[in-house]
Amino acid sequence: MDIKKVLIEFIITFIVIYVIYYFIIIKKNKKDKSMVPAEVNLILLFYKIDVKKIDIYQMVKVVSLVTTFIISTIITIISVFFDSTLILLIFGTLISILVAIICYRIIGRYYEKKSKKNKNSWHKVYVI
């Protein structure tokens, strides 16, 4: 196992998947703001994030980067460590669910705090 080969494989996979994701998801969302990926809808629903308080296009870009990272990481790990198809499918499914839950939870908490911060922000009025 050569580290340089693994890193190059990860970077190439990341770039290819992000370009595909960009043309399919991000460009479509830029034209039509109501067309958001399912991941974004689930994060908005689960964390009760107010869409009016955040930039939805920025959130779509962040989620697309994280999704690309998840897919690239799993492809790289599976291609390096596993040869058996059955083990590959089982491990790939389990690790993708685990990594997706962790990453989307971080994104959800970040945007939840950002939404609440904008919701509770008010300016103090000083009377002289």
Image (spheres, rainbow, N blue to C red):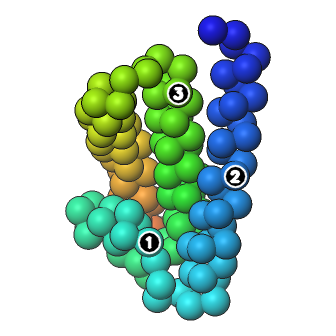
Nearer mark to the viewer, of 3 and 1:
3
**Residue 14's spot in the image, x, y percent?**
65, 44
Q: Which sits in the foreground, 128 or 84?
A: 84
Q: From the image, tell me which residue sits under label 3.
A: 79
| Residue shown at 53% from the left, 67% from the top | 60
Distance Cα–Cα, label 3 vs label 1:
27 Å
**Residue 48's spot in the image, x, y percent?**
26, 68
**Residue 16's spot in the image, x, y percent?**
69, 52
| Residue 116 visible, this orientation | no
| Residue shown at 40% from the left, 67% from the top | 40
Q: From the image, tell me which residue sits under label 1.
A: 37
Task: Return the disc, 3 or 2, that comes first in the chain's sequence.
Answer: 2
**Residue 3's spot in the image, x, y percent?**
69, 13
| Residue 80 visible, this orientation | yes
Above/below status of 32 relative to 86: below
Above/below status of 15 relative to 89: below
Above/below status of 105 relative to 9: below
Amino acid type at mark 3:
Ser
The label number, if any, that marks residue 2 in the structure image: none
Q: From the image, tell me which residue sits under label 2.
A: 16
| Residue shown at 43% from the left, 21% from the top | 82
Q: Quadrant of residue 50?
A: bottom left
Taking 12 as reference, is 28 left or right? Answer: left
Q: Residue furthest top?
A: 1
| Residue shown at 46% from the left, 28% from the top | 78
- Within 10 angstroms of label 1, few (less than 14), some, or many (20 or more) residues? some
Q: Secondary structure at mark 1?
A: loop
